[in-house]
Amino acid sequence: MSLFRKIFGLKPDHSEEEVKSSERGKYMPEIKLPIDEKFTINFKGNGGKFLYCENLNEIFQNLQSIIEENNWNDTKTLVLDEKIKEKFKNSNLNTTTKISDSSIFLTTCENLIANDGSLLISSKQIFEKRLPELPTNFVVFARTSQIVENIGEGLRGIKSKNKQKIPTNITTIKHFKSNDEKDFLSYGSSAKNLYLLLLEDL
């Protein structure tokens, strides 16, 4: 375009340049969002529902609100992790270890991935189960200290925390919308109706 301007003596179109510079500025790498803010934006963009909690009491209160809002009082909740079962033992959940009996899955995760708003999970949370086998409704308990920039950082963290035995079945959950709302990029993945209970621990 600048070559044509030189030949024909056209004046630069300032409005066009301003648009370009503002668009470019929007994606400039120097403008870095805080990692927690980036995760929140991307997670919500994926269709996830996010509840920030300052303490465990708020976690339990918000869990009860989620159950009431969705009329899940008579629904069985799948809990595979004994530590989670112990932590939420006073939450009046009707828990089970059988997938066929459950409509909700209560779990933790390995990490929260900021750059794409996904959740990194492993055999510590889902054992050897595949995501499509698990209930559609997920309630995930996580801490702000679990937020990492990208999957590579999350995988390095898993490796360093589990030097004796690295977990298997490592995967990410990224799509939190029903099948009819997903785009072609998410074709073949297992969408989950996901609530994140995020505890501030930093």
Image: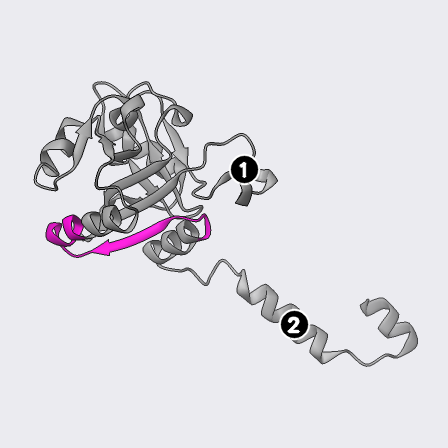
Horizontal side of 184 relative to 40 (left or right) equals right
Q: Secondary structure at mark 2?
A: helix
Amino acid at the residue labelled 1: Ser
Q: Amino acid at mark 2?
A: Val
Label 2 CA crowd tier, 10 Å (few <14, some 14–19, many 20+): few
The front one of 187 and 104 is 104
**10 Å neighbourhood of mark 1: few (<14), some, or many (≥20)?**
few
State which quadrant residue 182 falls in. top right
**What residue appears at the point 14 percent right and 27 percent down from the top-left corner?**
82
Q: Which residue is located at x 25 percent, y 25 percent?
A: 124
Position of residue 144 measured from the top left corner of the image (x, y, whole percent):
24, 49
Residue range in magenta is 45-61
**Residue tagged 1:** 186
Apparent side of residue 103 relative to residue 199 in the rendered image (left or right): right
Q: Which residue is mark 2?
A: 19
In x, y percent, where is residue 109? 28, 36
Left or right relative to 109: residue 42: right
Disc 2 versus disc 1: nearer the observer: 1
